[in-house]
Amino acid sequence: GLDDLQSLLQNGKHKELRDRLCCRLTFGTAGLRSAMGAGFCYINDLTVIQSTQGIYKYLERCFSDFKQRGFVVGYDTRGQVTSNCSSKKLAKLTAAVLLAKDVPVYFFSTYVPTPFVPYAVQQLKAVAGVMITASHNRKEDNGYKVYWENGAQITSPHDKEIIKCIEECVEPWNGSWNENLVDTSPLRQDPLKKICDCYMEDLKKICYHRELNVQTNLKFVHTSFHGVGHDYVQLAFKTFGFQPPIPVPEQKDPDPDFSTVKCPNPEEGESVLELSLRLAEKEKARVVVATDPDADRLAVAEQQENGCWKVFTGNELAALFGWWMFSRWKENCSEDADVKNVYMLATTVSSKILRAIALKEGFHFEETLPGFKWIGSRVKNLLDSGKEVLFAFEESIGFMCGTSVLDKDGVSAAVVIAEMATYLESKNLTLAQKLVEIYETYGYHISKTSYFLCYDPPTIKRIFEKLRNFDAPESYPKCCGIYNILHVRDITTGYDSSQPNKKSVLPVSKSSQMITFTFQNGCVATLRTSGTEPKIKYYAEMCALPEQSDRNVLEEELRKLIEALIENFLEPDKNGLVWRSV
C-alpha cells in the first residue's frame, strides 16, 4: 500500500495520489464496491475497519440486545497478491473490530456463497451481517455487502445513517487491527456446519420431483467460475436426489485471478462459457449451469437439436422459473389456498413476463426499484403480512426461488433448473421448447439489455440532463427517431407523466440516474447508470399479447427501436462511450 503511494509521489503522479487520498469510498448499493489498493477511495484494511466501526456505532444505537444476538461475517475467494488484500483477511478485520467491542461474531471458517450470509442472519437471529465479495466484478475489485436483521440487504435510510457513523469515527480503535482475534476470542463461533445443514434442509421445500431426479439420465455440467460455488452446488444436487453435476476441472477451485475467463461474469454469455460448453459436448450433457464467483447468480445454457447452444438471458430464465414455481404451487397447494394471496416480484428494468403470467393466472405481481435489496425488504413485508411469495428476480441473472433466502441465490436456482429440465425431459420437452410454449400462452416478451462503458462521470450527467431538457428546458423527449413516446418516468427526480399527480410510485433515488420511456408501440426502455460499475446500461422490451405471436416482426421492431435509442439519446460517438465488446 505505502509503496504504491510512495512511487506515485516519486513519479510526480499527483493527480492519482490526490484521487486515492482525497476522496472517501462511498457507501453505495448495500455497501462498498471498489478496487483493492492503497488510498481512502479503495477497499483495503483501513477502509474496511472504518466501515465496520461505523456499523458498530449504528447497530449499538439500533439494538439494545446487539451484544446478545451478535453479527455474521462471510467472505468469498478474492484476493490480490500485490496488495496482500484477500477477502478472508478483510473478513478477519471486520470480525476483529466487533470482537474487540465484545460483540459475538459468527465467522465462517471457510468461503461461502453470498446467500449464506443473509440466510445465517435470519437463522441465528443476528442483528446484521457482512459478506466480503465483489461478486462478478473484475479481479482487481472487492466489496463489502451489508445485511440487516430481516435478512435483506440494507436500504435507505440505514445506508445514510451508517455513512454518518463512519465519518464520526475514522480513527481505528484499539484492537481493530488485530486480525488474530478471530482465532483466539471466545466470542467467535463458526456457523458453517449448522448453516450448511439447515440451508440444504430448507432447500427440500422447493424440491417437487425427487423420484424423477433420482432416475433421470440427463447429465449436467456445472462451472463455478473460479469462485465459491463448487462444493455447495454439489451438495444441493445431492439434496434433490441427483447424481452430482460434472464440474469444469479448470474452474472448480477458487482462483483469485479468474485465469480462464476474460471477465468472471457469466452474464457475458457464450464467450465466457467456452470451457463448460466444450466439456458438456464431450460428456454428452445437455444442460450447463454456471454460478458466478460468489454463487448468487446463475447462467444456463442448453444444447439444441442442431448441436448449437442456447444461452438463456435472465429474462428468459425468469419466464421459465415463473411458470415452474406457479405450476408447482398450483399442483401442490391445499384445497382452500387462495391464488390472490400469492405474489411474484421483479425489478422495474426486468421483463414484464411475470406480470403477464400473473394477470392470466390470478396472482399478484409487483415491481421494485433495480437492485435485489429492494426485492428483499419488500418480500419480507409481504411475508410478515401473511402473503406467499413464490419467486422474484432481476434481469441480471439474479433469482430467488422460495423465501428461505431473501436475496438472489445461484445455488438454489441451479438445482431448481436441473429439476425443471428433468421434469420437462420426462414430457419430451426441452427448456427452450417450454420457453416458446410460455410465450405463446402469455404473449411474447422480447428484451435486450446491454451497456456502454463511460469512465467520465460528468459525461454521464450531461447525457441524462439533456434528456430532462430535450427540446426545451424541463421537457422530456416526445419521440425517439420515428418512435413516439407515450410516457416518461424519471426515478432520479420522481417524475412520472403517466400518474395523475405526475409523481412516480416507486421511491425517488437521487444518487443514481434512471429514466424509463414507454413507447406507443408497446415497447418499454430504460436508461440507467450502474451502482457498482462505470456503465450506462440500457434495457428494452417488446411486450405482445398472446395473439400477436410473430416473433420475427417483434424482434426486428425492437432492434430498430434500440438503434434509435442509442443514436438519439446516448450519442456514443459524440460522448466518447465505449461499446460493450462482444
Image (spheres, helix red, strand yellow):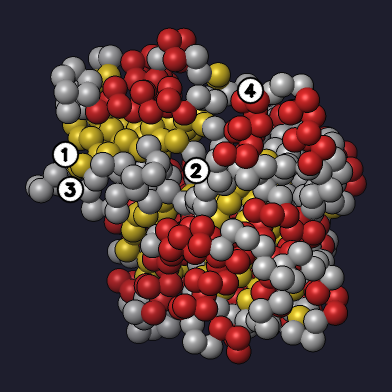
Mark before the other along the chain sequence, 3 or 2:
3
Distance of mark 2 from mark 4, alpha carbons?
22 Å
State yes or no: discs 2 and 4 in contact (Cβ < 8 Å).
no
Q: Which residue is found at the position 74% from the left and 28% from the top?
A: 8
Distance of mark 4 from mark 3, alpha carbons?
38 Å
| Foreground: disc 2 or disc 4 | 2
| Foreground: disc 4 or disc 3 | 3
Residues 434 and 167: in front is 167
Question: Alpha-carbon neighbours of circle 2 within 10 Å: few (<14), some, or many (≥20)?
Answer: some
Work out whether 147 lies above or below 422.
Answer: below
Q: Across the whole image, how many numbered discs are drawn on residues?
A: 4
Question: Alpha-carbon neighbours of circle 3 within 10 Å: few (<14), some, or many (≥20)?
Answer: some
- Say left or right for 528 vs 100: left
Q: Which mark is residue 503?
A: 3
- Say left or right for 332 vs 520: right
* Residue 346 pos. (x, y %): 42, 53
Residue 61 can be seen in this image: yes
Tell me the SS state at disc 3. Answer: loop
Distance of mark 4 from mark 1, alpha carbons?
36 Å
Q: Which residue is found at the position 43% from the left and 48% from the top?
A: 370
Tell me the SS state at disc 4. Answer: loop
Q: Which mark is residue 497?
A: 1
State yes or no: discs 2 and 1 in contact (Cβ < 8 Å).
no
Residue that mark 4 sits on: 582
Residue 550 can be seen in this image: no
Mark before the other along the chain sequence, 2 or 4:
2
Work out whether 12 lies above or below 331.
Answer: above
Distance of mark 1 from mark 3, alpha carbons?
8 Å
Q: Amino acid at mark 1?
A: Ser
Q: Which residue is found at the position 73% from the left and 42% from the top?
A: 37
Q: Amino acid at mark 4?
A: Val
